[in-house]
Amino acid sequence: MRLLASALCDHAAAGANGKLDMHGVFHDLYAQGFPARQERMVLVLSLEWDRADAGRYSFRIDVIGPGGRPTLTVEGQSEVTPRPPDRPPPRTRLVMPLEEIVFPVPGRYDFKVKLKGRTLQGPTLYLVETAEAADPTR
């Protein structure tokens, strides 16, 4: 099993052609003070499973803040459908809207994905304190 893609964005959805469309992908958020609140963001994960995987698997995503402690935990399940040997391995896409997320301090936040006894590195988000409106070119 491996993580094919992970991102934080403003919006994500499966297209009619089977592709995943992501809009507004970001790696940094700017706030004028802390704790900071993000009204909405979407976490996207694309997983490729082992050929022997089939059925329902529970997962857990911990957002680890600058102090090394979890600031948010998301739990869920993913359904894995086996595929014949002449097709690519089974894959699932997780599109998870997250609302009213509070980041207590500025710094690096790592999204750790735990499933099947393994921990995979998801996206990283940096929270930056600024005295003025966000300027993504800084």
Image: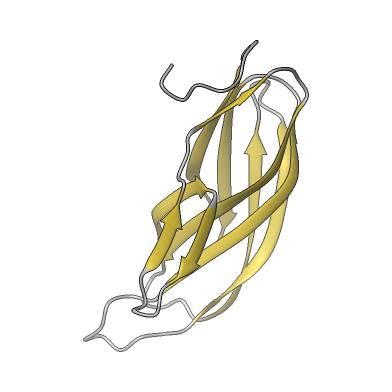
Q: Position of residue 52 (x, y in %)?
A: 41, 78
Which image quadrant is residue 96 in? bottom right
Q: Position of residue 4 (x, y in %)?
A: 36, 57
Colour pattern of the rendering: secondary structure
- From where the camera sits, is residue 78 visible? yes
Q: Give the residue furthest to the front.
A: 133
- From where the camera sits, is residue 1 visible? no
Q: Give the residue furthest to the bottom.
A: 84
- In the image, is 23 to the left or to the right of 115? left
Give the answer, above or below, for where 50 lies relative to 22: below
Please give the name of the residue rendered at 39% of the width and 76% of the height, measured from the top-left corner. Answer: 90
Give the answer, above or below, for where 113 lies relative to 77: above
State the count of labels.
0
- In the image, is 91 to the left or to the right of 97? left
- In the image shown, does 92 or 36 lie closer to the viewer? 36
Give the answer, above or below, for where 96 lies relative to 49: above
- In the image, is 120 to the left or to the right of 61? left
- In the image, is 18 to the left or to the right of 53? left
Q: Position of residue 7 (x, y in %)?
A: 47, 48
Q: Position of residue 5 (x, y in %)?
A: 39, 54
Q: Give the residue furthest to the top.
A: 131
The C terminus lies in quadrant: top left
- In the image shown, does 43 or 80 lie closer to the viewer? 43
Please give the name of the residue rendered at 68% of the width and 21% of the height, measured from the top-left corner. Answer: 67
